[in-house]
């Protein structure tokens, strides 16, 4: 029996700078193995291997991807054991988790810093400075794109029927929850389903919603009330004791893009670019905020203004993505220097120790079940 994997981000390259959600995503763990050490020492590879092995043993696993190298892993949670493994360099917020046993695994001993020449040390210092500069340029450019996006939103906000938008939201709340209130405290986890990466926008919506019975696709335009409605629905769910996974926008983390309600087997999400999908199975349903709450003909009346805004926005998003590409290339160069002086026999020894402990915990948990 193969376990189920779920893919997320909890670190984002956003218009408001780097944004972390690990403190929420990793709440409630019993134990956390925190991998510490230099980049390039195999932490992502170690976690990927462990995740594959746990999946092969029938465990359910959450994988958290790197937004700068989306094929790499920042962290893993075995949801059956309630145990996490994370790269301490990239997963800010984990050290402050309360009621979690944190075990630090130091890979620093695998790196022989004496092998670094003086020239290489200077090059590494320069590369780290360039990396900070590339990220800063990306965030500044994303911020400019967000201001342009605000112009785009203002067109539709001015044409909104807010009474009708509130009605749509209330009808959704009634259809989702009825008069039900659960006699428990809601568990709320804040996550990203996607991220701005050097490849452009990457998301895991389809896999995250694959097993759900119902999906509501929210269509509309910028400023047509999608995020506001999702916030209202999330607040209602929490007040009524329903567990909810709250997915923030990878471009503007102050906005919401999706909610998943495990107890209802339902997702409701902003299905517009750059994560635009369409119904393709039973249980899928569209709610179009443009049709329901925006003055008819708005697209046509403001077509010229909208086109100009779209072009400026697209140009800035491409520019910001290019800076992320620069950061990725610099990051790879930094890692290559540390890889060259890493004793991977030492790393493999730590891997086998962690593997053995996890196998013991899996066996022990199943014997107790």
Image (cartoon, rainbow, N blue to C red):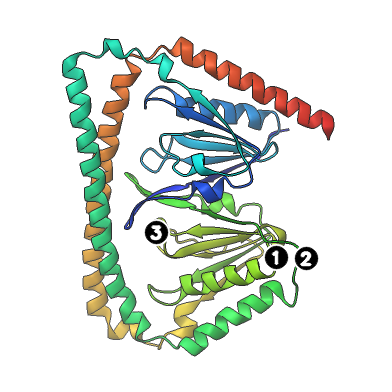
Judge the density around disc 2: few (<14), some (14-19), many (≥20) Cα neighbours within 10 Å: few
| Viewer-side residue, 272 vs 242 | 242
Task: Report the disc number at residue 274.
Answer: 3
State the image coordinates of residue 266 (x, y, percent, origin top left).
65, 62
Q: Is residue 96 above or below residue 17?
A: above
The residue singled out by tag 2 in the image is 183
- In the picture of the structure, the residue carrying the numbered disc 1 is 241
Labels 2 and 1: the sequence-earlier one: 2
Please name which of the two marks, 1 or 3, marks the residue nearer to the observer: 1
- Left or right of 294? Residue 51 is right
Where residue 37 appears, x then y in whole percent? 41, 25
Question: Which quarter of the picture shows residue 121?
Answer: top left
Please, what secondary structure does the residue beneath circle 2 have? Answer: loop
Residues at circles 2 and 1 in contact by the CB criterion of under 8 Å: yes
- Residue 105 falls left or right of residue 184: left
Residue at (74% x, 71% y) in the render = 181
Question: Considering the image in quadrants, where does the N terminus appear?
Answer: top right
Location of residue 3 with respect to 150 vertically, above or below: above
- At label 1, counting other C-alpha atoms closer than 10 Å, the crowd grade (few under 14, some 14-19, many 20 or more) is some
Residue 8, placed above or below residue 58: below
User: Which sits in the foreground, 301 or 109?
Assistant: 109
Q: Secondary structure at mark 1?
A: loop
| Residue 180 visible to an observer of this rendering | yes
Q: Is residue 171 left or right of residue 223?
A: right
Q: What residue is shown at x 37% (from left), y 24% (from top)?
A: 40
Is the C terminus in the top left, top right, bottom left or bottom right quadrant?
A: top right
Q: Residue at x 34, y 86 (%)?
A: 158
Nearer the viewer's eye, disc 3 or disc 2? 2
Mark 2 or mark 3, which is nearer the start of the sequence? 2
Q: Nearer the viewer, residue 50 or 86?
A: 86
Image coordinates of residue 98 in percent, x first then y, are: 58, 44
Report, in whole angstroms, how far the alpha carbon at label 1 lies from the one at label 3.
32 Å
């Amino acid at each position: 029996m193969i376990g189920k994997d779920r893919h997320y981000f909890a670190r984002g390259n956003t218009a408001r700078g780097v944004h972390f959600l690990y403190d929420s995503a990793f709440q409630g763990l019993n134990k956390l193995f925190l991998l510490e050490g230099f980049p390039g020492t195999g932490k992502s590879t170690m976690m990927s291997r462990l995740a594959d092995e746990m999946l092969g043993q029938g465990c359910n696993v959450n994988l958290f991807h790197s937004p700068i190298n989306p094929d790499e892993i920042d962290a893993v949670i075995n949801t059956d054991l309630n145990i996490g493994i994370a790269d301490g360099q990239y997963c800010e917020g984990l050290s402050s988790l309360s009621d979690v046993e944190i075990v630090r695994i130091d890979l620093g001993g695998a790196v022989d810093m004496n092998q670094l020449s003086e020239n290489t040390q200077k090059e590494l210092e320069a590369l780290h400075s360039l990396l900070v500069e590339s990220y800063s340029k990306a965030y500044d450019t994303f911020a400019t794109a967000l201001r342009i996006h605000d112009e785009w939103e203002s067109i539709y906000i001015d044409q909104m029927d807010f009474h009708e938008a509130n009605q749509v939201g209330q009808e959704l709340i009634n259809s989702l929850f009825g008069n039900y209130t659960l006699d428990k405290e809601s568990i709320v986890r804040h996550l990203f389903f996607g991220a701005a990466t050097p490849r452009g926008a990457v998301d895991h919506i389809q896999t995250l919603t694959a097993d759900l019975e119902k999906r509501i696709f929210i269509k509309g335009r910028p400023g047509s009330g999608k995020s506001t409605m999702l916030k209202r629905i999330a607040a209602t769910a929490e007040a009524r004791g329903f567990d909810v996974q709250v997915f923030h926008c990878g471009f503007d983390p102050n906005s919401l893009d999706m909610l998943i309600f495990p107890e209802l087997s339902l997702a409701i999400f902003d299905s517009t670019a750059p994560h635009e999908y369409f119904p393709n199975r039973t249980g899928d349903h569209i709610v179009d905020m443009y049709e329901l709450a925006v003055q008819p003909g708005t697209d046509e009346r403001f077509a010229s203004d909208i086109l100009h805004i779209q072009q400026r926005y697209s140009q800035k998003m491409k520019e910001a993505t290019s800076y992320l590409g620069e950061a990725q290339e610099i990051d790879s160069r930094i890692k290559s220097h540390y890889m060259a002086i890493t004793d991977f026999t030492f790393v493999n020894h730590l891997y086998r120790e962690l593997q053995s402990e996890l196998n013991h915990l899996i066996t022990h948990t199943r014997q107790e079940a």
